[in-house]
């Protein structure tokens, strides 16, 4: 069946009535860290979750749990005990009436684990849980090059095939299984936050990074060991190398010959690596 819409004002009254019934007689006590949870749940209007997901429920069958309460309980789970998992969270709802009340459930009448997974599946517009098939074709072991030679390219023309693949298809967004979740986040969270002024001036948003280093295509083996660039010598080419004296004493004749062949010395400045 379709879910029944429960307004946010009805939920707020439900929370006030049940908190007074359970905590006013002194049998249970609210501690300081409980009040931020109460306030967050009390002011967060999630009632439109039922309207948003109504089309994804059948017209027949048993009466489903209130989607707003299910989402509120899941968010509460992420706030207080994200490490225990949904199965243990259902046990926590039975054990702690405070969490059940904030979720919007009657203490002792909370949804089961299957109800949570069924609710979360409403946000995923696909019969499969994975975007790609689990069983992937077995890759062949690439051929190795001869000794002293570079290994042959395992996938020649890959960039060309990618360009041809993209050029044959128009620049149109294809529907994705996670579109419902993105649409819900945009309409019920981002837009509401913008209307409340929590995002500041929407016409003057600034995108900022967190200082994470960006990996480039630079090759660490191509890092120069001299200061040619600082001296204005841009075309510094390598030539046969004379290995540092402090290490030549520790190596045999054969090892020194190998290092002399593979290591660089700079022709322009004549500087050897330290």
Image: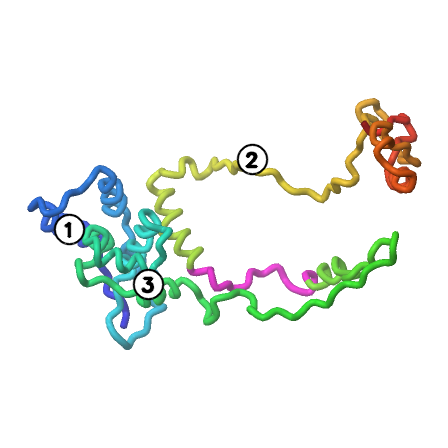
Q: In the figure, 130 relative to 15: above or below?
A: below
Q: Alpha-carbon distance for marks 1 and 3?
A: 24 Å
The reply to whether residue 236 is visible in this rendering is no
Query: Which mark is nearer the camera, 1 or 3?
Result: 3
Q: Which one is closest to the eye, mark 1 or mark 2?
A: 2
Q: Residue furthest left?
A: 25
Mark 1 surroundings within 10 Å by alpha-carbon count, few (fewer than 14), some (14 through 19), many (20 or more): few
Q: Helix, strand, or loop for circle 2?
A: loop
Q: Name which of mark 1 and mark 2 comes first in the sequence.
A: 1
The residue tagged 1 is 13
Q: Which is more toward the observer, 240 or 183?
A: 240
How far is the residue under mark 1 from the one under mark 2?
45 Å
Q: Is residue 166 above or below residue 63?
A: above
- Tell me the chief SS of the magenta region: loop
The residue stretch that appears in magenta: 166-180
Which label's residue is closer to the chain start, 2 or 3? 3
The residue under the point 26% across, 40% down is 36
Instruction: Name the residue carrying label 3.
Output: 116
């Amino acid at each position: 069946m379709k879910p029944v819409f429960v307004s946010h004002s009805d939920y707020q009254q439900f929370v006030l009535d049940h908190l007074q019934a359970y905590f006013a007689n002194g049998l249970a006590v609210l501690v300081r860290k409980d009040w931020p949870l109460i306030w967050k749940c009390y002011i967060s209007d999630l009632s439109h979750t039922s309207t948003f997901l109504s089309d994804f429920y059948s017209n027949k069958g048993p009466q489903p749990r209130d989607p707003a309460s299910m989402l509120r309980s899941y968010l509460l789970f992420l706030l207080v005990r994200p490490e225990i998992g949904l199965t243990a969270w259902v046990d926590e709802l039975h054990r702690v009436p405070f969490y059940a009340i904030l979720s919007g459930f009657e203490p002792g009448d909370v949804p089961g684990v299957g109800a949570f997974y069924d609710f979360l599946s409403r946000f995923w517009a696909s019969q499969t849980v994975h975007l790609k098939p689990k069983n992937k074709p077995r890759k062949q072991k690439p051929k190795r090059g001869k000794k002293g030679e570079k290994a042959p390219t395992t996938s020649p023309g890959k960039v060309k095939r990618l360009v041809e693949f993209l050029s044959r298809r128009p620049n149109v967004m294809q529907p994705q299984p996670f579109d419902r979740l993105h649409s819900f986040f945009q309409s019920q969270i981002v837009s509401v936050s913008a209307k409340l002024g929590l995002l500041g001036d929407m016409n003057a948003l600034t995108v900022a990074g967190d200082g994470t280093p960006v990996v480039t295509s630079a090759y660490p083996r191509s890092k120069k060991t001299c200061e040619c660039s600082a001296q204005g010598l841009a075309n510094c080419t390598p030539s046969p190398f004379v290995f540092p004296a402090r290490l030549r004493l520790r190596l045999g004749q054969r090892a020194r010959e190998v290092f002399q062949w593979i290591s660089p010395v700079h022709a322009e400045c004549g500087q050897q690596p330290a």
